[in-house]
């Protein structure tokens, strides 16, 4: 899994095709696709399909308050955010990193795409309720509770 966040240099097709999953947000997706529009989910899917054509195997696009989309040659799976009361949202710093890290953990444990996305969404929903990037990373138990998953299921 390659997170291209913060990467400003151009990434070669050879590099992109050598990783199993490329993870990015909509701004990074626009940059990697030569400025394609990424203002809507549909535009993000179209841009991600261009990356598939360049050899990427899977693309995980995080969309902030609009959730995330996992795109592969098999199709796409959308994950909505898990709702958090506005007054509980303290700091969104690190939420995307938290989402990607939790997704990677679930995938490494062999979970299916839907379960991995839900686990990641639960982690991000907890992350935004604590100030600071590092202190806001939630525990596994808290993620499982919010996701409505049992410890044995993920």
Image (cartoon, rainbow, N blue to C red):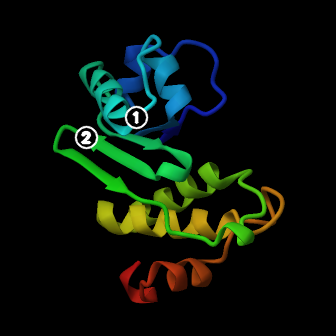
Helix, strand or loop at label 1? It is loop
- The answer for how far apart the CA atoms under marks 1 and 2 are is 18 Å
The image quadrant that residue 79 belongs to is: bottom left
7 up-or-down from 113: above or below:
above
The image quadrant that residue 84 belongs to is: bottom right
Q: Which residue is mark 1?
A: 40
10 Å crowding of disc 1: few (<14), some (14-19), many (20+): few
Instruction: Give coordinates of residue 148: x percent, y percent.
Output: 44, 84
Whether residue 49 sits left or right of residue 140 in the image: it is: left
In this orientation, which residue lies closer to the viewer: 56 or 90? 90
Tag nearer the camera, 1 or 2: 1
Image mark for residue 72: 2
Query: From this viewpoint, is residue 74 visible?
Result: yes
Name which residue lies at 58% across and 67% down. Answer: 123
Query: From this viewpoint, is residue 111 visible?
Result: no
Name which residue lies at 29% across and 21% down. Answer: 50
In this orientation, which residue lies closer to the viewer: 93 or 103? 93
In this orientation, which residue lies closer to the viewer: 68 or 135? 68
Residue at the extreme front of the image, as rendered: 86
Instruction: Give coordinates of residue 142: x percent, y percent.
Output: 61, 82
Helix, strand or loop at label 2? It is strand
Whether residue 47 sits left or right of residue 2 in the image: it is: left
Instruction: Give coordinates of residue 21: x percent, y percent.
Output: 39, 40
Which of the two discs, 1 and 2, labels the residue nearer the N terminus? 1
Total numbered labels placed on residues in the image: 2
């Amino acid at each position: 899994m390659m997170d291209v966040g913060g990467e400003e240099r151009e990434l070669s097709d050879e590099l992109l095709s050598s990783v199993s999953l490329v993870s990015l947000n909509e701004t990074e997706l626009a940059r990697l696709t030569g400025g394609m529009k990424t203002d809507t989910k549909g535009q993000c899917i179209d841009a991600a399909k261009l990356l598939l054509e360049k050899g990427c195997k899977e693309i995980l696009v995080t969309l902030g308050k609009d959730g995330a989309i996992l795109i592969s040659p098999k199709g796409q799976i959308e994950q909505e955010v898990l709702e958090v009361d506005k007054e509980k949202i303290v700091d969104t710093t690190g939420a995307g990193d938290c989402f990607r890290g939790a997704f990677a953990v679930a995938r490494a444990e062999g979970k299916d795409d839907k379960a991995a996305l839900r686990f990641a969404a639960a982690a991000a929903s907890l992350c935004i309720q604590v100030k600071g990037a590092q202190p806001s990373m939630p525990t596994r138990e808290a993620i499982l509770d919010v996701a409505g998953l049992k410890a044995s299921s993920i």
